[in-house]
Image (tube, rainbow, N blue to C red):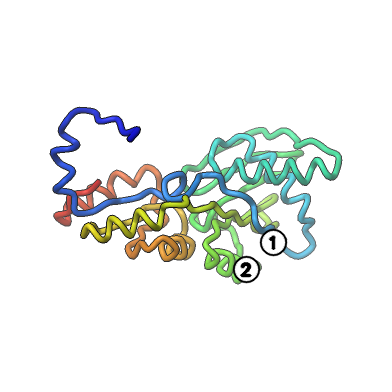
Amino acid sequence: FGIILKGGEALEKAYRVTTIAFDKTGTLTIGEPKVTDVTTAFGVDRREILRLAAAVEMGSEHPLARAVIAKGKEESASGGGDLPAVSDFRSIPGMGIEGIVEGKKLIIGNTTLLDNLKLNGDELKDAFGRLQSEAKTVVYVFIDNKLAGLIAMADTLKPKAAEAITALKEMGKEIIMITGDNPKTAAAIGQLVGIDRVMAQVLPSDKEKVIAGLQQEGKVVA
């Protein structure tokens, strides 16, 4: 079956499992998100946002970064140019990234990053909510601390994801999804695969604590 067992303990414990916690990206989804929408703030050029955002994302290895880079390169190729270089790149785990491109300070991230940096994204708040409700991951793009636009990305669910969740539920297992994504997008994806309990906006460093919390509730967690 292509399954490697590291000792017999896993098998001995498996029958006692009451709860199964899934990560989202690359587990329930294929892990290859693609850019679906680019929404710009007033007076900002769509291609310019993608070009600068893709340049900053070159410093990141996140699957979402790869999606922005691919779209940025595609747009740059049609415009006949390469992506510019990024300097002073900084990754903020679970929130976003920042860097300098062509003398401009780029900040790309989620609402948590906006709150932390006291940035205002109100102009595109409605568009942000609408895109999230479509099960898309959305990031804000700021250029020199001014809102430039939104980039929305969607990942494809694995073909057997919903089927696997249904089978596990029939075995009486409680299914939980733990993701760094926002609550609205996470709930939409949970609905698509049939997961009722979704824990969203969990930072990578906090996922272990979340599992420990579930175990304290008396659950045996896989």
What's the mark number on residue 127?
2
Residue beneath disc 1: 39
* Along the line of sight, the residue nearer the viewer: 27 or 85: 27
Q: Earlier in the sequence, mark 1 or mark 2?
A: 1
Q: Horizontal and vertical percent for residue 150?
A: 65, 58
Q: Is residue 197 left or right of residue 101?
A: left
How crowded pointer 1 is (Cα within 10 Å; few <14, some 14-19, many 20+) is rated as some
Q: Residue at x 50, y 46 (%)?
A: 30
Q: Residue at x 86, y 40 (%)?
A: 80
How crowded pointer 2 is (Cα within 10 Å; few <14, some 14-19, many 20+) is rated as few
Q: What type is the residue that disc 1 sits on? A: Thr
The CA span between labels 1 and 2 is 8 Å
Check contact, mark 1 vs mark 2: CB within 8 A.
yes
Q: Is residue 55 left or right of residue 175?
A: right
Secondary structure, mark 2, is helix
Q: What type is the residue that disc 2 sits on? A: Ala
Secondary structure, mark 1, is strand
* Along the line of sight, the residue nearer the viewer: 10 or 58: 10
What's the mark number on residue 184?
none
Considering every residue shown, the one lying at the far bottom of the view is: 126
